[in-house]
Each structure stands twice: as structure tokens, then as C-alpha cells.
Image (cartoon, coloured by chain):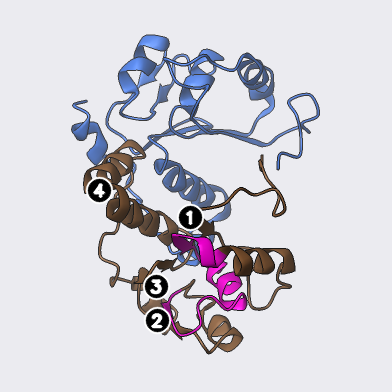
Chain colours: A brown, B blue
Amino acid sequence: MPTHTYETAPPLDVLLIPGGRGSRGSNTPIPEAIAFIKTTYPNLRYLITVCTGAGLAARAGVLDGRRATTNKMAFRDMVALRPEVEWVPRARWVVDGNVWTSSGVSAGMDVTLAWIGEVFGREKADGIADWIEYTRHEDASVDPFAELYGL
Amino acid sequence: MPTHTYETAPPLDVLLIPGGRGSRGSNTPIPEAIAFIKTTYPNLRYLITVCTGAGLAARAGVLDGRRATTNKMAFRDMVALRPEVEWVPRARWVVDGNVWTSSGVSAGMDVTLAWIGEVFGREKADGIADWIEYTRHEDASVDPFAELYGL
């Protein structure tokens, strides 16, 4: 159950943008989400995107001139959508300044754990991974799906 | 956003029970959820549990006499909670008849993909895994977390 709307959201330190319907190049985007990202971004400490959530951030213009990645099946759509972004085809996730962008869906777990490791320490990230019984990918450059989709 | 309550839920073919607060041995369980599982189970084609969701199914009595698994950090609590279940300490997931139970949190992805493979075919399961960029565990018996938690 969502606890806030775009209008009632408190000041944020971290914004995590998921992908899915409304974020894809070929679908109608969500104008309210894009406007929210645009106004919120300057005050964020960190921006994290998962999968095609990068497409919303790209539309908001906050990835322009930055290195970023996204879902590999949708990669070409994303490049066409916003060529001002330095899209990285082969990466599980990419860090550029305070912006952490990840590849398709499940890469969101790896980028989030990597971010937790950076901000709260490796022990915390390892503890969460063990608790959720997740064998995480720790090397951001290893990306078997780039090859699968011919990137 | 939930679309139904326990009272308005339509007839179900498949019930997937997640874990978390309200399902743990040491937390207060959710009586409405347990009652719902008890009345719904006889008409299900499949029951799937993730993590400590098995604790809710166990409390509903539907796992009695069956082989089942659950989160490994909470394993001992679960055994104490319902010793009538044949709890399996070393398994990513367990299939017993139409009941598919999985280990902690992320094992829910593996059991769901295995179930999709069984019901809809391997190609469908592989396609979804590739789409969500998930390298899935396909061997239900491989469980590094059982050892981690001394089971």
C-alpha cells in the first residue's frame, strides 16, 4: 500500500525508480513521475534506478551526460529515447557520481546491495544478502545478458 | 495496491504465500490469513510458499505430513512451531504433491520459475528469467544457506 502521493511525499535522501509499464520506450510514460524526478533530483543524496526505470530518469533529463545502464532487452529503445545519456551496454550496474543505474529487474537487487555496502558497510550488505538467501553479483562489469541480447 | 480482501477474493487456482512480518514464529501471526489458507487450500491446484510464508501454511495445518522447507535463519522456529510437518533443512525448494515450498526470500524466484517450467514449459520459464535478467538456481537440492545457518 503506497503511503504517499507525489504531492505529499516528504523530502527524500534516496529515490529508487523501478521499471515496468509506463517507463518503457514503447509505452506511454507517466508524466507525473517524470515531473517528480525532475523536481526531486537536485536535493537527493542518491538516485537509484532499476531496469527501465532509467527511462523515466532519462526523460527527466537527470541522466544527460552521465554513464548509465538499463534493461538489456530494452536497451536500444532507451538509447533512441535519450541519446544524451552515455548508455553503457555491458554492465550489471553503473555508478556515476550519486547516480546508480542497474540492468534488468533482478539487477536491482545487486545494485541495491552494492549501494548498501557503500553507504552502510560491507558487513551490512552481506548480512542482508544472507538473510534473504541471495547469492549476489558483486562485480558490476559481469553481464551475461548484454551478450544474450547482442549488445 | 491490493485488489481484493480475504472476503472478496475470487476462486483461486494458485495461492502464493509470502513471508515477512506476521508469518514468523516469534511474531504474532495473522489469524485472517491462516483462516483464508485453511478454507482455500482444498480447492487450489497449487500452493506455493516463500520464506516464512510456510509458517502461515503450517499454522493452517495444510503442510502436516508433507515435506516442506522455509527460511534457514528461521528454520528452528518453524520446526518448533509445527513439528507435524516434515521440514527439510537442506533445500532451495521442496515439491510435495501440489505444494511447492521455498527457502528464504530470494528462493521464491527460483521456486516460481521452477513451477512455471513445470506448468507452462521450460521455454516459458527461461524466457522470463532472461527478461528479468535473473540467473536462476535450477537444482532444488543446492542450498548454501543451510550450511551457513548450521542446519
Q: Are marks 4 and 1 on the same chain?
A: yes
Mark 4, Cα crowd under 10 Å, few <14 / some 14-19 / many 20+, is few
Location of mark 2 (residue): A88
Q: Which residue is mark 4?
A: A121
Q: Which mark is residue A145?
A: 3
Up-down relation of residue A136 to residue A139 (above or below): above
Secondary structure at badge 1 equals strand
- Which dot marks residue A14? 1
Say whether disc 1 or disc 3 marks the residue closer to the N-terminus: 1
Q: Mark 1 or 2, which is nearer the eye? A: 1
Residue B99 inside the magenta-drawn segment:
no
The local secondary structure at tag 4 comes to loop
Taking the spot 34% from the left edge, 42% from the top edge, the residue there is B140
Q: CA distance from mark 4 to mark 1?
A: 17 Å
Magenta segment boundaries in residue numbering = A41-69
Q: Is residue B5 left or right of residue B17?
A: right
Gap in angstroms between the C-alphas marked 1 and 3 = 27 Å
Q: CA distance from mark 3 to mark 2?
A: 13 Å
Instruction: Specify the quadrant of the image occupied by residue B14.
Output: top right
Residue type of the residue flagged with mark 4: Gly
Q: Residue at x 24, y 32 (%)?
A: B146
